[in-house]
Structures are given as C-alpha cells and as structure tokens.
Image: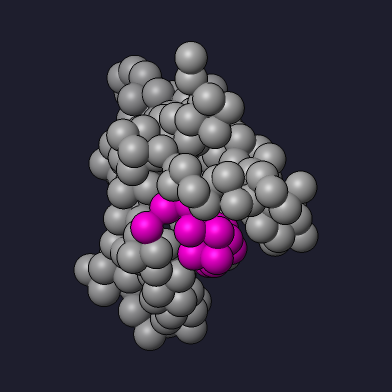
C-alpha cells in the first residue's frame, strides 16, 4: 500500500514534469507575434494548442503548491502558504498572457484589416511583458520559497534544494536586466539565467517520482504536528 507521503511526492513530481509541456509554445507563438499575422490566412490550430498548453502549465503549477502544502506547512506554514499564493499569482499572469495571444487569433479570424495592426502589435507586446513577469519573476519567487522549505526540511537532498535557492536570484537578475534594457528579452543571456530554475524544477519532478521524500525527514515533520 502506498503511504500518504509517497502519494504526495509522486503526485507533485508528475505535476512538476507536466509544467514543461508548454515548451513548444516558444516556437508556436513566433508566427502569432509576427507583425502581419492578422493579415494572413490558414488554420490557427497551433496557436490555440499553445494556449491550451499554457493553461495546463498554469493549473499544474497551482496544483504543485497545493499538493505539497500539507507536508511543507509542518516546516513553516506561512512560507508554504506563500508558495501557494505565489503559484496562484503566477498562473494568473499566464492566463492573462494566453488571453492576449488568443485575442490576436480572434482578430485574424474576424478578418480585420491593416488598420488593426497597431492593436495586434500592442497585444503581442503585452504578452511579452506579462510573460516576463509571470514566467521569470514569479517562478523565481516560487522556487526561492520552495528551495528554502525543502532545504530546511531535508525532504529531498540539500544539493537539489540549493539549485533552486541559487537559481532563483540568477533568474531575478536576468529579469531585472531585461526590465532595465541591459539585455533583450530573447537574448541568449536572458535564457541562460533561466536554466538553473528549469533544472531545479525538472530534477525535482524526476526525484519526487523516482525516489520520493526522505522517509526520516518526513517522519520528523510529522512529529512536529
């Protein structure tokens, strides 16, 4: 029979891996954000699929925090609740970004003319800005909280937790560098700053699925309740 802790770790691990399904949108959305997309013809299936993938990621992100909350709150309830709140805020920005992109698709389907190009450009710009906030700034906050909680609780190897703790400030540095125009949002340097956080979440997902929580650490947390 699977223990409650194993169920939590397995579910959380699968959800973390699910948050990577939106990676194809980096390519899919390229055409949607192009200047003349609304004047073109053809199916919008890829853009709609991209939106669905992002919605899945948003919901999975919230679910990771909710799934881990029962055990993380035994370490620090305030920080565990903060993680849930941060994930909800992150998901909200993702939903908003999807709305911006799908609005461009709707304009195209409506057959708007060249006079709507400024609106299309504005929506694409808004998507880029909300993406920067929702998938750079907020993930850094989430992983800093999560990394700290996991480090203190020893539920997973501390080396793994440290990837999140160290990666979060690096991602924040990349965010502010883009925000102040020091590097472009799509420059390689901006992408490099996101690698440690992505590595942390992917590695955590794999670890939780394959290994689960440290049994001794989980038992120690239960004794606090």
Q: Quadrant of residue 185?
A: bottom left
Magenta highlight: main SS:
helix
- 106 or 52: which is nearer to us? 52
Horizontal and vertical percent for residue 207?
A: 33, 43
Q: Is residue 61 left or right of residue 185?
A: right
Give the color scheme: rainbow, by chain, secondary structure or one colour. one colour
Q: Look at 76% across and 60% down and name the residue there.
A: 78
- 123 or 24: which is nearer to us? 24
Horizontal and vertical percent for residue 55?
A: 53, 31
Q: Is residue 203 visible?
A: yes
Q: Look at 26% across and 68% down and name the residue there.
A: 192
Q: Is residue 194 visible?
A: no
User: Measured along the vertical axis of the image, is residue 180 above or below residue 122?
Assistant: below
Count of all numbered marks drawn on residues in the image: 0
User: Measured along the vertical axis of the image, is residue 124 above or below residue 153?
Assistant: above
- Does the stretch in magenta take in 160? no
Q: Quadrant of residue 82?
A: bottom right
Q: Look at 49% across and 48% down and name the residue there.
A: 216
- Does the stretch in magenta take in 150? yes
Horizontal and vertical percent for residue 58?
A: 55, 38
The stretch of residues the image draws in magenta is 142-157
Q: Is residue 94 left or right of residue 196?
A: right
**Furthest residue toward top:** 1
Q: Is residue 170 left or right of residue 150?
A: left
């Amino acid at each position: 029979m699977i223990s409650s802790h194993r169920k939590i770790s397995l579910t959380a691990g699968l959800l973390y891996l699910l948050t990577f399904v939106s990676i194809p949108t980096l390519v899919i959305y390229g055409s949607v954000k192009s200047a003349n997309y609304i004047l073109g013809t053809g199916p919008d299936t890829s853009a709609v699929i991209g939106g669905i993938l992002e919605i899945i990621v948003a919901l999975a992100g919230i679910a990771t925090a909710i799934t881990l909350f029962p055990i993380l709150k035994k370490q620090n309830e305030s920080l565990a609740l903060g993680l849930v709140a941060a994930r909800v805020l992150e998901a909200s920005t993702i939903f908003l970004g999807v709305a911006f992109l799908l609005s461009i698709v709707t304009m195209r389907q409506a057959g708007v003319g060249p006079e709507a190009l400024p609106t299309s450009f504005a929506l694409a710009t808004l998507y880029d800005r909300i993406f920067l906030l929702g998938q750079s700034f907020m993930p850094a906050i989430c992983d800093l909280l999560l990394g700290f909680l996991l480090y203190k609780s020893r539920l997973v190897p501390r080396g793994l937790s440290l990837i999140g703790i160290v990666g979060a400030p690096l991602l924040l540095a990349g965010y502010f560098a883009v925000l102040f125009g020091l590097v472009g949002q799509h420059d390689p340097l901006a992408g490099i700053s996101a690698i440690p956080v992505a590595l942390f979440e992917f590695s955590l997902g794999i670890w939780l699925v394959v290994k689960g929580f440290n049994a001794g650490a989980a038992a120690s947390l239960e004794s606090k309740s």
